[in-house]
Amino acid sequence: MSAMTKDETLPGDVLLRGLKLTRRWGGLVAVDGVSLDLRRGEVHAVIGTNGAGKSTLINLLSGEIPPSDGGVELLGEDVTRWSQPRRARAGLGRSYQRNTIYPTFSVFENCRLAAQARTPRPWAWWQSAQSCQPSREAALAAAGQAGLSGLLERTAGLLSHGQKRQLEIAMCLATGPQVLLLDEPLAGMGAEETERMLALLAALRASHAILLVEHDMDAVFRIADRITVMVNGAVIASDTPDAVRADAGVQAAYLGGH
Ligand SMILES: Nc1ncnc2c1ncn2[C@@H]1O[C@H](COP(=O)(O)OP(=O)(O)OP(=O)(O)O)[C@@H](O)[C@H]1O
């Protein structure tokens, strides 16, 4: 186990590492020996056709499903056998393709509930949730970071699609993560909402390691520092955007002249 604490890690440090991760569903190999490093200060995009294994890879890294083979290290520690909530408490945040907000609660309440999940206090069940100051502060900070300060009292279900995705990121940030695993945060967004989300990711990059699974190739090639390309569960390239764009194997298998 590493003796390093979270706050001692330096920019560029590897915060999350997938080691030869494999996941089989019966006879299908959904993720096939994938290794990748997520570093603070980098947006690392994972691209690939439908069914290439991207969401399964995120689920393996986040702890939602166990690998058939291989391992995961978080902040230098082997977390392969850790549950998803335990990894989340240790600094691993993720967003989902589906909407995970509470539509009848306000933006602030959504963020506060997410923040509370980070520091559950089962022995203090009689205290009013309203009075939990650290959660309130974390919620306000996260909403601010995600650009939602002006919408704190808005009922979440009434937000625009793009604002809902911003709220999902805010809820993720409220848990105090160092690593963000983002599953298609741009899905269904218009041009303006996409720009706002890309600006948010660019702002979060300095202090986080970000894994971005995304189908919007223009956005990926603009924002990513590194791109990993998956085909049929396996990595066929992992490099800078320029190198990936120029890779003949990637062109043939996936990009088709992008
Ligand atoms: N729970 C499951 N049981 C059986 N097969 C599964 C399961 N989850 C995923 N798969 C299969 O694993 C393969 C990889 O799926 P995955 O969702 O990871 O791909 P993806 O790259 O995220 O696709 P998309 O871009 O469409 O989201 C697919 O063939 C899928 O059908």
Image: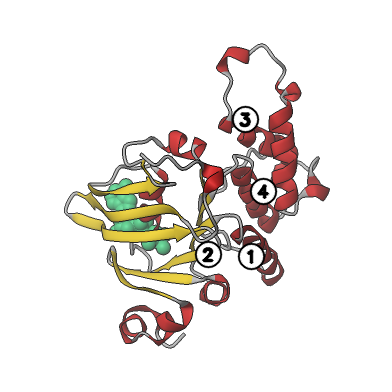
Q: Are marks 1 and 4 in contact (CB under 8 Å)?
A: no
Please name whichever residue, 65 or 17, is drawn nearer the observer in this view of the structure.
17
Residue 251's place in the image compared with 125, above or below, is: below
Structural distance between the alpha carbons of marks 3 and 2? 27 Å
How many C-alpha atoms fall within 10 Å of the one at disc 1: few (<14), some, or many (≥20)? some
Q: Residue at x 48, y 59 (%)?
A: 39
Disc 1 versus disc 2: distance between alpha carbons?
8 Å
Q: CA distance from mark 3 to mark 1?
A: 26 Å
Tell me which image quadrant ligand 1 sits in.
bottom left
Mark 2 or 4, nearer chain start: 2
Residue 43 numbered tag? 2
Residue 214, position in %: x, y? Answer: 49, 65
Name the foreground residue: 63 vs 151: 63
Which of the two discs, 2 and 4, sits closer to the camera?
A: 2
x 31%, y 37%: residue: 81
Name the element at disc 2: strand
Q: Quadrant of residue 252?
A: bottom left
Does the beta carbon of the residue at mark 4 sit less than 8 Å from ligand 1? no
Q: Given contact means CB atoms under 8 Å apart, are the residues at marks 1 and 2 in contact?
A: yes
Q: Secondary structure at mark 1?
A: helix
Q: Amino acid at mark 3?
A: Gln
Query: Which amino acid type is marked by label 4?
Result: Leu
Judged by depth in the image, the label closer to the viewer, 1 or 4, is: 1
Q: Earlier in the sequence, mark 1 or mark 2?
A: 2
The residue singled out by tag 4 in the image is: 167
Residue under pointer 3: 116
* In the depicted structure, whether residue 248 falls above or below residue 109: below
Q: Secondary structure at mark 4?
A: helix
